[in-house]
Image (tube, rainbow, N blue to C red):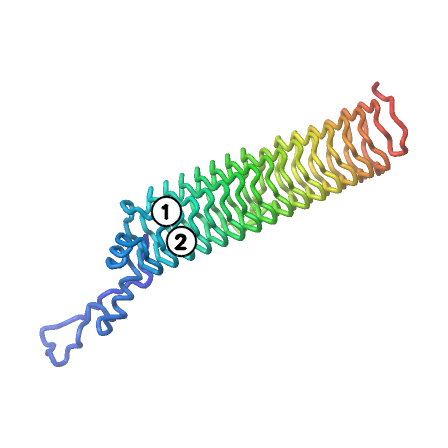
């Protein structure tokens, strides 16, 4: 750890043999030596206070203590009170902190790998750049916690409470967040690769630039979540766009979600609620959207080539300029859908319902339209 900030260096003065003792300045190895209290305070800001370490070991009560860079691997801290303590850079690998009071505690850069934090209270704690790999945070209270750039890979966060927390650039690969509550959290550029988010509450969360490949989101609540692509300026000065990549959302609730430009190619989205979702320019090529609710969704200019939309509800949806070439629309409901200038070619749309749909300037060549209810209410026999 780089501790050059605030570090106190001794001052060296050049001396010659002609210097008299009277003329020489009084040297101090530490400029704060004249004020012992300030010197002690400054020293404590750099490393753990031995008295605080002893107090913690003897009593498990050390609120506000300075334990920076301390090695606490041999400590039993179950039910400990470390509220507001400084544990920056500390080593707590494998330590038991179950049900501990860690409110507003500073764990920046700390090693918490394999640590037991189940049911611990970490409200407003600082965990920036901390290592929480394989840690147990089941049922932990993590409201408004800063987890930016932290490593939570393979961590158990099931049933945890993360409302209002920030996890920018956080690694959550293979983490278990099932049944957790991350409502209104900032998850920008976070990696959820292979993460388990079953039945998690992720409503109103910001997922810009997030990688959700192979993530498991069955039953997750993603209402009004923001999945828009994220742009950043790279060294060359050009703009780099990060697209959301999502693999599986079976049964997820994405009502009113902002999914502009999201990448759902080959994603499994069975029985997903995407009602009124913003999917403009979304990439849904070869995705499985069977029995999903896309009513009133905005799919303008979306890529739906080879997409399976069998038995899905697209009533009132906006599909202006969307590409549905070779999509599968058997039993789909497109009542009142806007299909102006939409590509609807080589599609099996058997028994689909297009009542009152607007197909002005739509391309409709090579389709199997057996049993299709046309915009005027008549039933087609084409392809039967």
Binning the other alpha carbons within 10 Å of mark 2 as few (below 14), some (14 to 19) or many (20 upward) gives many
Taking 97 as reference, is 309 left or right?
A: right
Residue at image coords 39%, 50%: 100
Quadrant location, the C terminus = top right
Horizontal and vertical percent position of residue 308: 69, 28
* Residue 174 seen in this snapshot: yes
| Side of 350 relative to 85 (left or right) | right
Disc 2 element: loop
Determine which residue is flagged by label 2.
102
Horizontal side of 380 relative to 86 (left or right) equals right
Residue found 72% across the figure and 38% down from its top:
294
Q: Name the residue under label 1.
A: 97
Residue 9 in the image, given as x and y percentages of width and height: 25, 64
Classify 132 as above or below 363: below
Query: How would you rate the neighbour count of disc 1 (Cα within 10 Å): few for under 14, some for 14-19, many for 20 or more?
Result: many
Question: Quick check: 246 above or below 308?
Answer: below
Q: How far apart are marks 2 and 1 (CA)?
A: 9 Å
The foreground one among 300 and 218 is 218
Q: Position of residue 170 (x, y in %)?
A: 47, 46
Discs 2, 1 touching: Cβ within 8 Å: yes
* Residue depicted at 45% across the width and 39% down the height: 156
């Amino acid at each position: 750890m780089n501790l050059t900030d605030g570090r106190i260096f001794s001052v060296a003065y050049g001396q010659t043999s002609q210097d008299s003792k009277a003329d020489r300045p009084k040297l101090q190895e530490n400029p704060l030596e004249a004020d012992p209290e300030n010197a002690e305070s400054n020293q404590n800001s750099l490393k753990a206070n031995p008295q605080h370490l002893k107090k913690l070991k003897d009593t498990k009560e050390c609120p506000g203590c300075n334990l920076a860079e301390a090695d606490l691997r041999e400590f039993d801290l179950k039910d400990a009170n470390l509220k507001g303590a400084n544990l920056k850079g500390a080593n707590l690998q494998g330590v038991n902190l179950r049900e501990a009071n860690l409110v507003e505690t500073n764990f920046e850069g700390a090693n918490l790998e394999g640590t037991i934090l189940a049911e611990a209270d970490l409200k407003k704690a600082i965990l920036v750049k901390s290592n929480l790999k394989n840690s147990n945070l089941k049922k932990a209270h993590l409201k408004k916690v800063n987890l930016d750039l932290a490593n939570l890979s393979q961590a158990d966060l099931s049933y945890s409470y993360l409302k209002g927390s920030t996890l920018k650039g956080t690694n959550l690969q293979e983490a278990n967040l099932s049944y957790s509550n991350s409502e209104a959290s900032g998850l920008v550029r976070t990696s959820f690769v292979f993460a388990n988010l079953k039945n998690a509450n992720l409503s109103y969360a910001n997922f810009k630039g997030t990688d959700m490949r192979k993530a498991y989101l069955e039953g997750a609540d993603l209402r009004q979540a923001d999945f828009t692509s994220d742009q950043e300026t790279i060294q060359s000065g050009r703009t780099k766009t990060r697209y959301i990549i999502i693999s599986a959302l079976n049964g997820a609730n994405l009502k009113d979600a902002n999914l502009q430009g999201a990448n759902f190619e080959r994603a499994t989205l069975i029985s997903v609620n995407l009602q009124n979702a913003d999917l403009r320019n979304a990439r849904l090529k070869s995705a499985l959207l069977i029995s999903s609710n896309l009513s009133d969704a905005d799919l303008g200019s979306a890529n739906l080539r080879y997409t399976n939309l069998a038995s899905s509800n697209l009533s009132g949806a906006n599909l202006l300029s969307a590409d549905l070439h070779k999509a599968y629309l058997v039993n789909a409901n497109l009542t009142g859908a806007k299909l102006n200038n939409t590509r609807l070619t080589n599609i099996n749309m058997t028994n689909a319902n297009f009542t009152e749909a607007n197909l002005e300037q739509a391309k409709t060549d090579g389709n199997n339209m057996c049993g299709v209810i046309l915009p005027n209410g008549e039933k087609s026999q084409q392809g039967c």
